Amino acid sequence: MANTSDSSIESGGLTPEQRLDPPNTRLINAGIATIRDMKTLRACVAYENAHQQRVQILRRLKDRASEIRSEDT
């Protein structure tokens, strides 16, 4: 695993790969739910688009983006 000064590690100390590639969907959902900022969310969307392109995961990320935006207002 990369050290914490690595820019690929986002808020919460998890990389997009760690958030989106756990062995079960409950952990993926938890990884998405703990995203707190748009930088991390964008990194996860980019990771998903570059690797698996799962529509359900992208939809969950979109929903989380809406939640983050509504929290900022």
Image: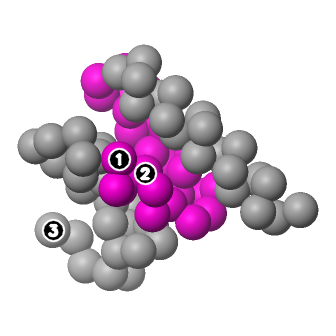
Give the number of the disc on residue 1: 3
- Residue assigned mark 2: 32
Picture quadrant where residue 15 is located: bottom left
The amino acid at mark 1 is: Asn
The residue depicted at 60 percent of the width and 35 percent of the height is: 62
Tell me, yes or no, whether the two marked residues, 1 and 2, touch with CB atoms within 8 Å.
yes
Coordinates of residue 1 in the picture (x, y in percent): 15, 68
Relative to the observer, which residue lies in front, 7 or 28? 28
Picture quadrant where residue 54 is located: top left
* SS for callout 3: loop
* SS for callout 1: helix
Judge whether 32 appears above or below 45 on screen: below
Judge whether 13 appears above or below 55 on screen: below
Relative to the observer, which residue lies in front, 36 or 43? 36
Coordinates of residue 72 in the picture (x, y in percent): 81, 64
- Residue 31 in view: yes
Apparent side of residue 43 relative to residue 26 in the rendered image (left or right): right
- Residue assigned mark 1: 29
Apparent side of residue 64 relative to residue 5 in the rendered image (left or right): right
C-alpha separation, residue under disc 3 versus residue under disc 2: 20 Å
